Amino acid sequence: MPYGRPLPPPRSGGGGVAAVFTVLGVFIVVGLLVAAGFAASSSDSSTTSYTSPNTPSYTYSPSPTTYSSSPTTTSRPPSTTAGSTTTRRTTTSTTPAGPKPVAALATNPIFAHSDTGLINITCGYPTWAPNLAAAQAFFDAASDCLGRMWSNLLAYENLPFSPPTVNVTATMAEATSPCTGGVSGNWAAYYCSANKAIYMPMEAFMRYEDPYDSVTFLAVFAHEYAHHVEFLTGIMGKAHDDRYDAGLQSPVGLEISRRLELNAQCFGGMFIGSSAFVGTISGADAEAVVQDNYGRGDKAGDMRDHGSKQNYGAWYEHGYRNNRAQMCNTWAAPSDAVA
């Protein structure tokens, strides 16, 4: 669908009181970068035919001076024995019943309807504190809230749903997965589709963020959850295969990466917008998050796999203002909208 700046929809009541969070610092979420610093696409599904290697999707933190998801029949070979006739046996394997991911991008069912988005529900969160127990409880609650929102939409579009695993670790080196080992750098979190897990290391919070800024951490988590949604729908696997075929760092491959990242950016905005609409996050805090996203995105000298600051912010605002999945269809947007 054509891409343009959205108009703010009617909103109820004003900002509201933040039920759980208080912003103590600026919002610092930036886009994702693919594993090993060269691929911004996701890993392949263990239940589909994707053949590309597993790679995680990272959310990076900024440097101190910059901003930075019918039965099939097979035939066996004829078996013969002395004095017998050749016989042919077939075996039928039944695929699991229920919704399946669809390996499609612009035409993915998640974008099928213009009037579908996340349900507006209030969610309770335990008090945030910068320690493992409190952080695990906080992100588990966030996962439950996001799951209730996204499962409703995916079910409506006949797409599968299962929740991700949430792993909070003390150090970045401990955040190991089938996608990658311990890695260093300025990333804040990542999603691995090989085991459908989100990794949130406390060390990154302490090093790059205000350790008490729970709104930032919620938004980072929602972005990673959006990659999980891309995986569940089939978008992530298709994008990964297309980028692998095009060349990970080719112009086409990098554009695919930007479309995937900006899609997740828009999905993340939907969640923050819905949360603000019901008052879980104050309107003022949420608006600050939106405006801050216009300072994120690719900088001069970057690999150009996230999107320009303008597009990075605009896609986030698309999701935030409208809460409509179809408006997050970066795959149908012209190239300049995902530059």
Image (tube, rainbow, N blue to C red):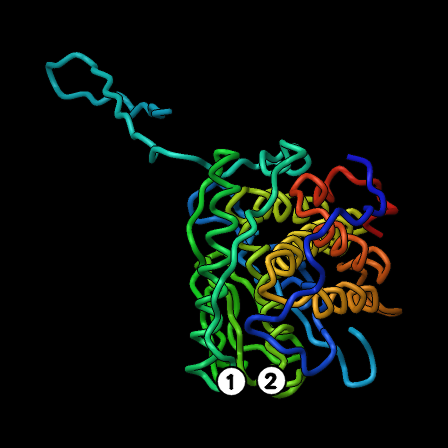
Identity of the amino acid at label 1?
Ala
Mark 1 surroundings within 10 Å by alpha-carbon count, few (fewer than 14), some (14 through 19), many (20 or more): some
Pointer 1 or 2: first along the chain: 1
Which residue in the rendered view is the most extreme toward the front?
13
Q: Quadrant of residue 330?
A: top right
Q: Residue sitting at 62 percent across and 49 percent down? A: 240
**Amino acid type indicated by mark 2:** Tyr
Residue for point 71% across, 52% down: 11
Query: Where's residue 143, x and y in %?
Result: 47, 62
Total number of numbered discs in the rendering: 2
Mark 1 lies on a secondary structure that is loop
Report the residue marked by disc 2. Answer: 212
Residue 104 at x, y percent in the picture? 61, 36
Q: Nearer the viewer, residue 211 or 20?
A: 20
For image coordinates 46% across by 58% down, the residue present is 196
Q: Residues within 10 Å of mark 2 (few under 14, many from 20)?
A: some
Write the residue at 51% across / 70% down: 199
Judged from the image, the secondary structure of the residue bearing numbered disc 2 is loop
Position of residue 49 in the picture relative to residue 219 (left or right): left
Residue in the foreground of this view, choosing between 111 and 232? 111
Q: Within the image, what quadrant is residue 327 found in?
A: top right
Tell me where residue 14 appears, x and y as whole percent. Answer: 72, 61
Where is 131 relative to 177, above or below? Answer: below
Contact? badges 1 and 2 (CB < 8 Å): yes
Q: Which residue is mark 1?
A: 129
How far across and down, in percent of the image, does residue 207 sit? 64, 87
Residue at the limit of the structure toward the left, as seen here: 83
Judge by depth and name the residue closer to the eye, 193 or 188: 188
Image quadrant containing the N terminus: top right
**Label 1 to label 2, Cα distance in Å?**
7 Å
Identify the image quadrant of residue 39.
Answer: bottom right
